[in-house]
Image: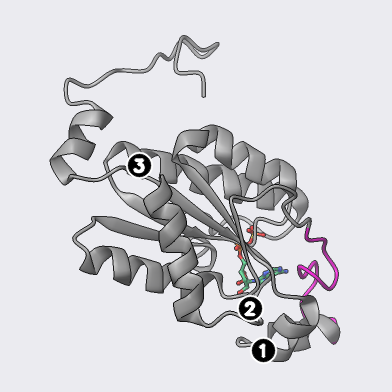
């Protein structure tokens, strides 16, 4: 992202303590693991288990979960394409600040549009961004329906529901794809941790 002069006459004020210094202080490389997939594909579950594993190993972490940010930071946003783009933009900006603070971030958002995920990668920085696609079919996710939302989407009680009445564009070149219909949470975790260590 451009941190130089802007048309609003705002320029980036550099601190004396740098992101590198903060990361060294925390003895870790700040990364954002970005989970994308349909509702019910296991994003929040994996993000919480990843955080537990990393936290237990001594890392400083934070989870940015779509459902949670939509209760505060993004409470003014709905599920139109434009609102989802703005949702992803805000979360990506927060992830970037958290990475600058030295934290390892797990982001769990449907993030259904390829363009929005590319924007998130751009905002956070490709070297800090791991895109994990939770590849579970609509049938599997709808079968799970942990929040009863697919049922409501089918009866028309919820509009623009991803997979039912709103599109999901699967990533073409994710850093990692996990089929959560077959893999256990522990298996999936091992795959994510392996990718994390690789970085
Ligand atoms: S995103 O598309 O903008 O990335 P996000 O991950 O923040 O979505 O929020 C998705 C969560 O909102 C789902 O887990 C679900 O609980 C809830 N939700 C409510 N309405 C919808 C909808 N129309 N489409 C998808 N998710 C919805």
| Secondary structure that dominates the magenta span | loop
**Mark 3 crowdedness (10 Å alpha carbons): few <14, some 14-19, many ≥20:** many
Residue 40: assigned label = 2
Residue 125 visible in the current orientation:
no
The residue at the point 78 percent across, 55 percent down is 169
**Mark 1 crowdedness (10 Å alpha carbons): few <14, some 14-19, many ≥20:** some
Q: Is mark 3 within 8 Å of ligand 1?
A: no
Membership of 164 in magenta stretch: yes
Q: Is residue 170 left or right of residue 103?
A: right
Upstream in sequence: badge 2 or badge 1: 2
Which residue is labeled 1 in the image? 144
Task: Specify the quadrant that holds the C terminus.
Answer: top left
Indicate the position of residue 176 as horizontal and vertical percent values.
59, 56
Which residue is labeled 3 in the image? 99
Upstream in sequence: badge 2 or badge 3: 2
Q: Is mark 2 within 8 Å of ligand 1?
A: yes
Indicate the position of residue 135 as horizontal and vertical percent values.
69, 68
Q: Secondary structure at mark 1?
A: helix
Q: CA distance from mark 2 to mark 1?
A: 7 Å
């Amino acid at each position: 992202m451009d941190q130089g002069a802007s048309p609003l006459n705002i320029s980036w004020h550099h601190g004396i303590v740098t992101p590198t210094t903060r990361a060294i202080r925390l003895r870790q490389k700040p990364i954002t693991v970005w989970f994308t997939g349909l509702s019910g594909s296991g994003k929040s579950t994996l993000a919480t288990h990843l955080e537990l594993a990393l936290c237990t190993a001594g890392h400083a972490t934070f989870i940015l979960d779509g459902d949670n940010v939509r209760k505060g930071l993004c409470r003014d946003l709905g599920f139109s394409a434009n609102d989802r783009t703005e949702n992803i933009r805000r979360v990506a900006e927060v992830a970037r600040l958290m990475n600058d603070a030295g934290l390892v971030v797990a982001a769990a958002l449907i993030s259904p549009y390829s363009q929005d995920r590319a924007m998130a990668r751009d905002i956070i920085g490709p070297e800090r961004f791991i895109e994990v696609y939770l590849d579970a079919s609509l049938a599997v996710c709808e079968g799970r329906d942990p929040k009863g939302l697919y049922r409501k989407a089918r009866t028309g009680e919820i509009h623009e529901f991803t997979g039912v009445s709103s599109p999901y564009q699967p990533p073409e070149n994710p850093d990692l794809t996990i089929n959560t219909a077959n893999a256990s949470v522990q298996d999936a975790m091992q795959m994510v941790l392996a990718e994390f260590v690789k970085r």
